Amino acid sequence: MILSTGGHAMEQPTQKSFTTSDGILIRYRVAGAGPPVVLLHGFSMSSGMWWQNGVVDALGGRYRLLAPDMRGHGDSDKPHDPARYGRKLVSDVAELISAEAPSGAHVVGFSMGAELSLPLAVDHPAIIRSLYLIASGWSPPEIVDEYRIHMDWARERTEQDAVDDLDALSAAVDAVDATVGLPEAQIAAIDLPMSGIVGEFDVERPHLERLARARPDFDLEILPGVDHMGSWKDPRVPGRIARFLDARPR
């Protein structure tokens, strides 16, 4: 599912970890130097997606990139209890930012990572500088149906490569409702620069368009001919993220 983009390779990231307040080991990668940017991957993916799609190459020369493997994913701990997911995914990111970038960080998220970015800004506004959302955002509770479709894909992948802990992913899906369906008043109260990008044929496009209607300051770009999984690896995305971040105060 993850494709190499070719081109020049960025220096190898530093591998780091921390233990969350509820005892979960989170592993993350650090690369580059400059203002901090947190990169949040999609469901059943890992921090490696940002190296594969060229975002690290595009940003690492002038930003300090912090890319966690969310709990249940990658090399981080994978509990099987749904009570260990939900809003705890949000607090994991807040703890990472508080440790690595206490003055605040920009946040870029794809799919699940984009969905987590909004409650992160609601719960921890003092440590978030801006949000860039890719392929998802202000999702309603019904988004759990899309997660169940992704679970089917994860099962197929695991049958071939044994890459996922399906019990952990299933537990995460069971707790999705704690991070979506935010009230419009909370969305309106987010006092941050926000922008996003979504594919023309992405089933989650309506959620980002709803966000743009509720927030006229939310600049949404539509990628012609692109679906949900095509957006994270679209070659235009790294440059769009860079343009958004470069326009922010350093």
Image (spheres, helix red, strand yellow):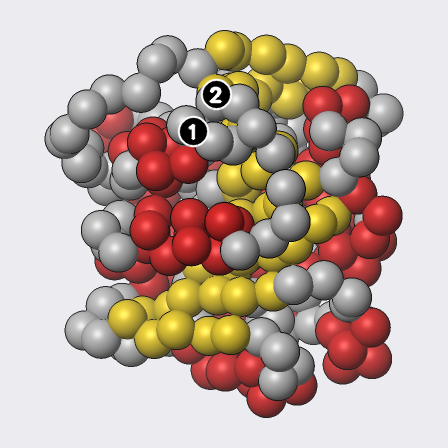
User: Foreground residue, 234 or 2?
Assistant: 234
Residue in view at x 42 percent, y 54 percent: 243
Q: Secondary structure at mark 1?
A: loop
Residue contact at pointers 1 and 2, CB within 8 angstroms: yes
Q: Is residue 176 left or right of residue 154?
A: right
Identify the residue shown where x is 34% and y is 75%: 222
Mark number for residue 31? 2
The correct choice, above or below, for 164 with respect to 219 in the image is above
Instruction: Report the side of 147 relative to 102 (left or right).
Output: left
Residue at which label 1 appears: 60
Q: Amino acid at mark 2?
A: Ala
- Whole-number angstrom distance, CA of label 1 to CA of label 2: 6 Å
Q: Residue at x 41, y 66 (%)?
A: 197
The earlier-in-sequence mark between 1 and 2 is: 2
Say which residue appears at 73% left-offset and 29% top-offset: 101
Give the quarter of the figure containing the C terminus: top right
Would you say residue 164 is visible in this rendering?
no
On the rendered structure, is 7 left or right of 159?
left
Q: Position of residue 62 (x, y in %)?
A: 47, 31
User: Relative to 171, is 192 above or below?
Assistant: below
Q: Amino acid at mark 1?
A: Gly
Given the current orientation, which residue lies at the most extreme left position? 6
